Image (tube, grey):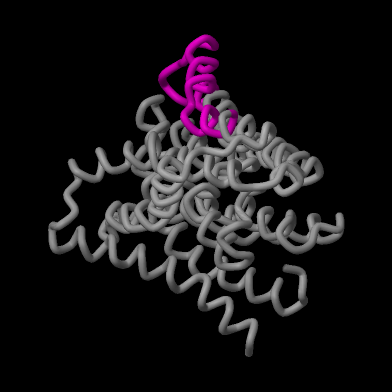
Amino acid sequence: MKELILSFEIVIPIFLLIVLGYFLKRIKLLKHEAMETMNKLAYYVLFPVMIFNSLYTAAFNQAFNLPVIIFTVAYLAIMFVLALLIIPRLEKQNEKRSVLMQGWFRGFTLLLGFPIITGLFGADSTALLALVVVVAVPLRNVLSVITLQKYGQTKVSEKAMLMSIITNPLIISCILGLIAMSIDFKMPYIIAKPIEDVAKIGAPFALILLGGFIELGKLKGNIKQILIGVLGKLIVWPALFMAAAILLGFRGIELGVILTLVCVPIGTATFVMSQEMGGDGELAAQLTIFGTLLSIITIFAWIFVLKQFALI
């Protein structure tokens, strides 16, 4: 019963923030034009500050964990290969293929990971997650561009792809955070305190925003593709890779971070990138919406099971 209650305590606040965003959109306090601006605010300011603060306030041995980083890279590489081998056999349209493939290896690790890890291990335990996010983000982007180059309608040059990685605000914030952590740099309180306060805003703000983007009326059509994308992303592959992580000996916060890597739904970045590069934007939106709703149940189940067996 204790594990059940703790699982609820972690997942329900996430769910309620998403519901709040949906409600605010319904009563028109959140409007589409404003949400686009708010989304940029989260990506270019709030998330980078979250990552920087997580690393800045941590000890080096908390942030750097080579086995978890290797697992992260291996997971994304294997998922990309599996998607490349399986999805074209299940779907004939290239625009849908590109979205389904991304749906298997992209995820909301940044958005959902921080509240999950904070709920499980405390607010001072997010440094490893921050580093994993910054390893996963550019790798996912590169794999997405490769996918869209192959199956999308718009092509991107290697130079443009490289520049998008170099100028990524998450990468920049991670580098700054690692430098500050490695030299034990201490900022004056009057600077450190606002950074800490902004870092606390990031995840709740983004979850409310996510709720605003949900449009239940669009959950129609593409039933086969939605089942392939969502069931693969949230049930089939998490079962495989979580089992592998447990067998490899990951426990505690390491396994918790891996949970946020492999068990989260497809992110809105897939919709944006698919729109820009000739993928099926409508299918990407449907996968995001339906996956987010179902993930409330699946993430709760994973946390409960792992807690029940004292693995996290």
Quadrant of the rendered structure where residue 21 is? bottom left
Whether residue 237 is visible to the viewer of this picture, yes or no, is no
Q: Position of residue 41 (x, y in %)?
A: 32, 39
Q: Residue at x 54, y 16 (%)?
A: 162
Q: Main secondary structure of the magenta part?
A: helix
Along the horizontal axis of the image, is 4 left or right of 253? left
Q: Position of residue 295 (x, y in %)?
A: 50, 63
- In the image, which residues are magenta? 148-175
Foreground residue among 238 and 66: 66
Foreground residue among 112 and 295: 112
Residue at the far left: name it: 28
Along the horizontal axis of the image, is 248 left or right of 61? right
Foreground residue among 224 and 262: 262
Q: Residue at x 63, y 57 (%)?
A: 125
Q: Position of residue 187 (x, y in %)?
A: 51, 38
Q: Is residue 252 above or below residue 95?
A: below
Q: Is residue 158 above or below residue 86?
A: above
Which part of the image, by quadrant, shows the N terminus?
Answer: bottom right
Q: Residue at x 42, y 40 (%)?
A: 191
**Is-magenta flag for residue 160?**
yes
Q: Position of residue 50 (x, y in %)?
A: 48, 45
